Every structure is written in structure tokens, then in C-alpha cells.
Image (cartoon, rainbow, N blue to C red):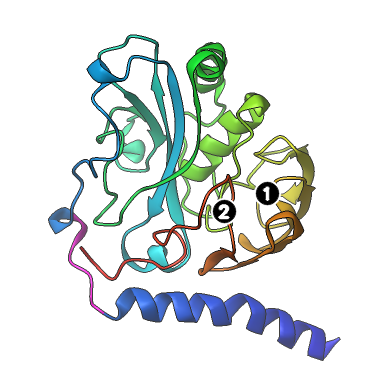
Amino acid sequence: MKPFWIATIVLLLAPVGCSLMAQRAGGQPHWSQTRWASAGLLPDPATDPEALVQVWAARTWGWKGAFAVHSWIVLKEEGAAEYERYEVVGWGVRRGLPAVRRNLRPADGYWAGNAPELLGEKRGAEAAAAIAKIRAAIAAYPWADTYLTWPGPNSNSFVAYILRAVPELGIELPPTAIGKDFLGASPFAPMPSGTGYQLSLAGLLGVGIATREGLELNILGLVLGVDPGDLAIKLPGLGRLGLHSANGGASAAPLDRPAAGA
């Protein structure tokens, strides 16, 4: 069994090492000195009145960025004058603040200098029908006052919970969304895309298979996988490497190659 475990360790740590070196190549300023402003990717709600649901993610700050992304969800009711952004953060939770925050940052904002990437969306009637369910899922989120970077519940656990509660969204989270496989006390649940199922032991060890995600193995929160439908492989740190992005369209760089600063 020794060769098997050596190969497993190499598969887990080598991609993370490459990701960490890429991140550190240009250095990184303190998070307070990085860019948090809008990336200018969303239109003015006044000129785009239709209902909208979007899921975004960006690499996290510091050494964690070699492993993981931070994800959030954006809503806009039909005719609404502004976007709403919902996410989970750990800042202030120990002092009694809720983990779930609304409009903490711009809807399409950079995260500690790292560019946001749109993971998936619904517009028009589909979005309008989903928004009430999303609001109910946000209200029912069981870890609203709890945050744990690893293995969860964290920002990715929150977004994955919402996606499971509203499977018609059909959005896949990237393998770098560490915490997405945290299920609490339950070992069995749908995959976040709603197109398959997974077994997970506290987000530390598990397996999932789905039409959208393909096959994923979770080892200590790090994901190895293969997506035959999109001819992609999934590696810790490096993310998803393939011909197409997970939720349609061409692959984008921010989640696959962490920024070296901003």
C-alpha cells in the first residue's frame, strides 16, 4: 500500500505547491491594501431590469489563496434598483457578529485583489422563480453564526447549501471551493449542482458523482476529480483544467491561476 499513499500525497501536494509558487511569484500586499472595489462586470440595474441570480467566486487572500476560493451569491428582483450580495465571512463571528452578511462588498467586487469570476447565473423568469427559494434557504442556513476556515462551515459551505436547496440553479462550484463538501452531521447529500449525490465525512473525506461535476474525491478537503463531459481534470490548488468552464463557455483564468497580488 505504500506506493499508493505516496502517489496520493504527490497528487494532492504537487498541484498545491505549483499554485503556491504562482501566487507568491509577485508577492502580495496586506489584505487591507488590496482592491475590493467593483470589477465593473455588472450592468446598471436601471438599464437591466430583469430578475437575476448569480454565483461568483474569487481566490482568497494570503497562503489560503493557493488552496481555495471565496464564493458568494448575488440576487436582483425584477425592476430592483440594486443588487444584493450574500456571503459568509469569519470576521467578527467570535465577537458575536453573524457569519452570513448582506452587501458586505460590491456585488461583483474583487476579493483581496483577486478578480471575481462568474460561476453561473439565471435570468428573467427562471431567476424570479428561484429568488424566493434562495431567500428561504438563506434564512434556514444552519450555521448562520458559525465559521471555520477548514473544513467548514465557511463561505463555500454556505453557497453549496443554497445551491443544494435550489437545485434548479444547476450551478457547479469549482474544486477549489474548499468547504463545499461540508455537510454537518449528515454524511449524504446532493452535489451542489443538484445533478448527482455525494458521501462526505465532515468535509474531510468523501466521494461524489454527478452529471455536472463528474467524479470527485475529497481527501482532507482537497478535491481530485475528472469531468468526462467537459474533458476536464480537477486538481488541488490548480483547480479545474479543461477545454470548457464548469457551467458553460470558455475557461477563465482567475480561479485556475491565483493572482500574485493586485
The secondary element bearing badge 1 is classed as loop
In this rendering, the answer to whether 123 lies above or below 183 is above
In this rendering, the answer to whether 16 lies above or below 42 is below
- Relative to 12, is 20 on the left or the right? left
Q: Quadrant of the N terminus?
A: bottom right
Mark 2 crowd level (few <14, some 14–19, many ≥20, 10 Å Cα): some
- Relative to 237, is 182 on the left or the right? right
Mark sitting on residue 151: 2
Residue in the picture at 37% in, 69% down: 63
Query: Looking at the image, can residue 199 be seen?
Result: yes
Gap between marks 1 and 2 measured at Cα: 7 Å
**What amino acid type should be assigned to the residue bearing mark 1?**
Ala
Residue in the picture at 79% in, 50% down: 209
| The one of 191 and 186 positioned closer to us in this rendering | 191
In this rendering, the answer to whether 100 lies above or below 112 is above
Q: Position of residue 17 (x, y in %)?
A: 48, 81
**What amino acid type should be assigned to the residue bearing mark 2?**
Pro
In this rendering, the answer to whether 87 lies above or below 227 is above
| The one of 98 and 234 positioned closer to us in this rendering | 234
Q: Position of residue 224 (x, y in %)?
A: 67, 66
- Relative to 129, is 192 on the left or the right? right
Q: Position of residue 149 (x, y in %)?
A: 46, 52
Q: Is residue 28 magenta?
A: yes
Residue in the picture at 71% in, 41% down: 191
| Range shown magenta | 26-31
Disc 1 + disc 2, Cβ < 8 Å: yes
- Relative to 121, is 33 on the left or the right? left
The secondary element bearing badge 2 is classed as loop
